[in-house]
Image (cartoon, coloured by chain):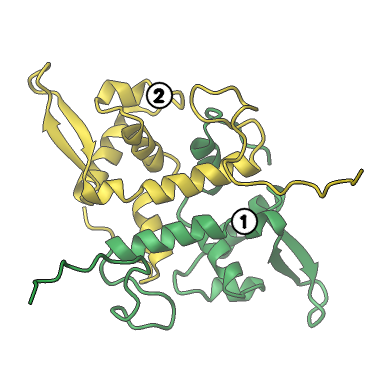
Chain colours: A yellow, B green
Amino acid sequence: MKLARRSNCPVACTLDLLGDKWTLLVVRDLFVGRHRFDEFLASREGIASNILSDRLARLSAAGIVEQRPNPEHRGRATYHLTKRGLTLESVIDAVASWGLANLPGTSLAGRPPDASRSPRKRRRPPSSGA
Amino acid sequence: MKLARRSNCPVACTLDLLGDKWTLLVVRDLFVGRHRFDEFLASREGIASNILSDRLARLSAAGIVEQRPNPEHRGRATYHLTKRGLTLESVIDAVASWGLANLPGTSLAGRPPDASRSPRKRRRPPSSGA
């Protein structure tokens, strides 16, 4: 599953691997503790099972995800971030922070839309004196 | 050009806007000083003109890019990052850093592949004593 590179630019090569609407959502789910195929399918965005299978296979081929046997269900694997996969936290964080700061109505899971606006520091308006 | 959101997750909503193989490359080009349509077309990845037109229109609709008249060619606009667009630097940086650190052979423009490996700090191995 080796992909042809469009250039040796690190942005282009990362997008060759992760540049679509679904791959980083699977990575996000892994970071928040989802590990089973049915858990990914149950995420709010409604990923289709064929797309999920494809993205898990690509992420495995890229050394970002590894399968482990599921002790509760023989024959059904669980999926985990590898050491390399864990380094994607910086990318997920940058994407999430940008969305929170720039796309009104977005919120982190489980928080109401306006309680979790940008994690970035905001400048206080200058004191009006007194 | 309003896109339907899949959820209110900031990762998902950012990917609704930027999650493809080309959009962040146009943003990258803007950050490195390309502003004309033909300059984007000339980038190494070989973006097609219809895809480029579509992405510039989407980025404009999202308030990330603005058109300005080109004083040298009437009727041909130049494209510039808005204040909102400039905040994508953190996303580009995270994606580029991840690529440099994890995808062998990637390099920043104009540098040989191995002279520019990850900008991240690396731990030194512990001193072997003496």
Check the image and name the residue furthest to the right: A130
| Location of residue B115 with respect to A12 vertically, above or below | below
Q: Amino acid at mark 2?
A: Ser
| Location of residue A62 with respect to B8 vertically, above or below | below
Which chain's residue wears label 1? B
Image quadrant in which the N terminus of chain B is located: top right
Badge 2 is on which residue?
A43
In the picture provided, is A37 more to the left or to the right than A130?
Answer: left
Q: x%, y% of residue B119?
A: 38, 69
Can residue A101 be seen here? The reply is yes
Q: x%, y% of residue B64?
A: 67, 54
Q: Amino acid at mark 1?
A: Thr
The Cα atoms of the two marked residues, 1 and 2, are separated by 28 Å
SS at badge 2: loop
Badge 1 is on which residue?
B87
In the picture provided, is A64 more to the left or to the right than A117?
Answer: left
Task: Please determine if labels 1 and 2 lie on a single subunit.
Answer: no
Work out whether residue B98 or residue B64 is closer to the camera in this orientation and state it: B98
Q: x%, y% of residue B43?
A: 50, 74
SS at badge 1: loop
In the picture provided, is A50 more to the left or to the right than A47?
Answer: left
